[in-house]
Image (spheres, rainbow, N blue to C red):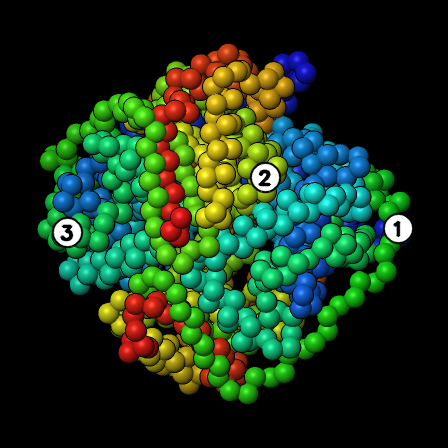
Amino acid sequence: MTKQAFSSLKVNSLPGPDDITRVQLKNGITFLFRPNMNSMAVSIGGYVQAGSIYDPQEKLGLADFTTSTLKRGTKTRSFQEIYDTLESIGASLGIGCGPHTAGFGGKALAEDLPTLLEILADVLMNPTFPEEDIERVRSQLLTGLDLRAQDTSSMAMLEFEKLLYQDHPYQNPSDGYIDTIQAIGVKDLAEFHQTHFGPEGTGLVIVGPYEPEHVIALAEEHLGGWVNENQAEARQVPNMPSPEKTIMKHHVIEEKSQTDLVVGTIGPSRRWKGYHSALLGNSVLGQFGMMGRIGESVRNQAGLAYYAYSALSSSIGPGQWMVSAGVAPENRDKALDLIKEELKKFVAQPVSDEELRDVQSSYIGKLPLSLESNAGVAAALIRMETHQLGLDYLRNYEKMILEITPQSVLEAAREFLDPDRLVISSAGAEL
Amino acid sequence: MSLLENIPSIYLENGLEIKLKEIHSAPLISSWVWYRVGSRDEIPGKHGISHWVEHMQFKGTEKISSDEMEKAVARSGGVWNAFTYLDWTTYFETMPADKIDQALELEADRMVNTTYDEKEVESERTVVISERQGRENSPSFWLSEALHNAAFRIHSYNHVIIGDQVDLETLQKEDLENHYKTYYAPNNAVVAIAGDFDKSKMLERITELYQDIPAGNDPPRVNRPENPQRGEHRLTVEGPGETILGDVAYHTPSASEPDFFPLLILDSILSGPQGLNMFGGGGISNKTSRLYKRMVEEKEVVVDIHGGLPATIDPYLYSLNFIVHPNSTTDDALKILDEEIQRLQDTPAKAAELQRAVKQTQALFAYGGESITNQAFWLGFSEMFDSYEWVTGYLDNIAAVTPDDVQRVAQQYLQPKNRIVGIYHPHKKGNNNQ
C-alpha cells in the first residue's frame, strides 16, 4: 500500500485555523469556538486549574468533593432551582475532577445556550456550599468508596497507581479515602474554591450553530467578568522514573469470581516528542482489531479472558503504559506470563511494516468518526488547547501519523517499557 | 431529510427487510444487521446460547478469517460491535463511506457462512464464562439474576442474557451451530444502513450481496406467556460489601401496547428521562424527578435512584434501582417509594411535568441525531419489537399522553401484587437492618 492510499481524509473539512475561533476573554479565559450550522444542539466544555494534585495529603478527595458540590447551591439559586432550570429544557451540565483540572461539559438545544452558560457561570463563580447539602454529598461519596472497595477493576487500578507513582501527586486517588473524605469540612471546600477556581488557566469551548461574534459576546457576558485575585498559580508536577524492579501486589476482595489484573509502567506525557510513535505502538500491542497482540494471545489463543488490552494514558505529567485483563483467579499467573511474553517481543524487535500500516490507516480513518458530534469536536479542541498542539493539529494529523516508522515505535517502546521492571497489581479473591 | 422521517422498508424475495437513510453531513456510513433472536428464544439447558453465537460470528467464514475480519474494519478506522438482547441480536459497523463495502460484504457472508470449529468453540467457552464471571463481580448482577428468576416463572425472560454457568459449561458445538442455522437467515433479519451514500446504488449492492441467500424456515419461538402475578414477591441476595441495593420491578406491557407511552412518561416523572440513544448523545440528569427529590434529597433514604422501562416484544418489567443510604434501611426506602407511587395514583401529574418530559425527549433525539451510528441504530431497533414507525411516532406519542393517562397506568401497573422487590444485602449488615 502506498502512502497515497491512506489519503481519503478530506483535510479541509476538519476543524482548523480558518474555522476555529480562539480568543482570550477580558479576564484571560481562553475561549474556543467552532460552528456547526447543521446541528440543532450545542455542546460546551472546559476546564479550571483545580484538580486533585492540589489535595492536601490528609484531605485527599478535596478537589473532587468541591466539584461535586458546586451545583448544590449558589448565592442566587438552590440545588433544586439549578436542576429545575437545566432539566426543564433538557439540558445537562456535568463537572468532574481530574488530576490537574476540574473539567466541565454540557449540552442543550441550540436556543438554550444562554441559559446553559448562565448556570455554568453561576456554579463556577458563586457556589455557597450549604452545610446540609455538603453532608448529603459526603454520604454519596462515602457510599461510592464502599462500592469502589468491592470493585476489582477499580481496586487493581488504585493499587497500581499507588505503586507506580510512589511519592508523586499522581499516586493518590482523586476520590480519596473514607477517612480523608470524613476529614473535609465546609470551610475546606469554600477555601479550595476560593484558592483554585478563577479565570487564570481556565478554558471554555463551544461547538454549535452560531456565528462567532454571537458566542464570544455570550461568553463575555457570562464568564468575562469573573475575577479572583487570590487564585493560586497552576502547579507543575515532577517527572517520575520507571520502577527500579518489578513490584507485585494482590489486593484481596472476598467472593469475587474474576480477578482484575493491571501490568504496566510509566508512559509518556502527552507533549513528549515521540507520543504518536508510542500511541501507534500501543495499538499494535493491545488495541488494533480485537485488542492487538495482547488480545490475540490472552483472549483468542488462550481463551483466558473476556477482555485483555493495553492502554496508553498520557496527560500533562508522567503517563501510564499498561495492560489490563479480567481473568479467573486460577488463570492470573498464566495471563501474566503471556502478557510479559508479548511485552518482551514488543521491545525486542520493531513492529512489522504491515502492522504499522494497519494502525496508521486505522488512526487516520477514525478521525472523522471521532469528530462527528459537537461533543467530539469540543473534546478535540480541549485536548488541542490543554496540550498546546496548535489549531492546525487535526489538519496535520495524517502527515504526523504517516511519519511514524517501525524504528520510532521501537524507540518509544524501549524508552518506557522494560519487562523486568513492571508494576503488577491484581484484585480479587485470595489466590 | 428530517431526523425522524418515515423510511419505507424494502423486501428482497428471500424475505430480507432493508431500510436505508441517506445522511450527508459527514463522510460516514453506519451499517446494521438485526436478527430476531435473543435470550427470549432460549430454553432451559441452552441459556446463553444466543449470546455465545454472537461471539462465534467473529470467528470467520471460509472466505474470510477472524483475523482478516477484524483487520478489515480496524484498518479503515471504523468501529464495529455486536449486542445480544432479550429479543434481538445485532451487528454493526460504522466506517468511512468509501470503505463500507467491506462491512457489507462481511455481514452478508457471515449471515450463513460462519465456520464452527471445535477448537474455536472451546476457546470461546472460556471467554464467555470469563465474561459472566466479570459480571458476577458486581452485586447488581446477582440481584438482577435473582429478580428475573422470580419475575418470570414461565416466560423465557426469566434468565440473564449471558446465560447460566452450567449451560455455558455444557453447550456443544452442534447446539451453537443449530441455533445459528435456525435463526440466521434473511427472512429473520433486517439490514439498516444510514449515512453518506446514494440510496439506489446502496440498494443495488445489498440486493447483489443477499439475493442468493435462501430463505430459512420460519424460526421456532418459545411461546410461553407469563401468568399474571398474584401477590408481591420479595427476595434477598446476600454477598460481600457494605452497601444495600434495591431493585423494585413491576410487570409492564410490551412496547407495542398503547399503555407503553404513558408508562414512559410515568417513568420520566418518577425517576427521570430515558432516551433512545445507544451511541453518544448522553443523557439528562434526574435530580428533579419525584423519586430523586423525595428519596435522595428530602428523606435521604437512598443515595441514588434510577428507573428503566425497556421496549420489548412481550410484557416485561419497569425497574427502579436504588442504593440505600448508609444511615437508612430498606424498609424506610420502600415506604417513601410507595408514598410517591401512591401520590401519582391519587392525583394526576401536573401538565408542566408532562411538558418537561416532552422537551427532554426532543433534546435527547437532537443529541442522539448528531451520531450517524445512532440514526442507523434507530432504523432497525424498533423493527425488532414493533416497526420503525414506533421511533418516528415516539415524540408524538409522548406528547399525546395526558395526566389522566399517567394516573391510570400508575393505578393499573404499579400495584404491590404486580411487583418483585429484590434486595442485595451485605453479609456484614446482619438481618436487623432489613
Residue B34, given in percent of the width and then of the height, sits at: 70, 52
> Which circle marks residue B214 in the picture?
1
Q: Please tell me whether mark 3 sits on a helix, a strand or a loop.
A: loop
Asked whether residue B189 is in view, the answer is: no
Q: Residue at horizontal 58%, vertical 60%?
A: B165
Three-letter amino acid code of the residue under disc 2:
Ala
Q: Residues within 10 Å of mark 2 (few under 14, many from 20)?
A: some
Nearest the viewer among B297 and B370 is: B297
Question: Quadrant location of residue A266?
Answer: top left
Q: Residues within 10 Å of mark 3 (few under 14, many from 20)?
A: some
- Residue that badge 3 annotates: A184
The count of marks equals 3
Residue A263, given in percent of the width and then of the height, sits at: 41, 34
Q: Residue at horizontal 61%, vertical 16%?
A: A353
- Protein chain holding label 1: B
Question: Quadrant location of residue B9?
Answer: bottom right
Same-subunit check for callouts 3 and 2: yes
Compared to residue B223, the image places residue A131 above or below, namely above
- Residue that badge 2 annotates: A302
CA gap, disc 1 to disc 3? 68 Å
Residue B129, given in percent of the width and then of the height, sits at: 57, 53
* For the residues bearing labels 2 and 1, Cβ distance under 8 angstroms: no
Q: Please tell me whether mark 2 sits on a helix, a strand or a loop.
A: loop
Compared to residue B23, the image places residue A246 above or below, namely above
- Protein chain holding label 2: A
Q: In which quarter of the image is the C terminus of chain B?
A: bottom left
> Which circle marks residue A306 in the picture?
none
Q: From the viewer's perspective, is B33 left or right of B320?
A: right
Same-subunit check for callouts 1 and 3: no
- Protein chain holding label 3: A
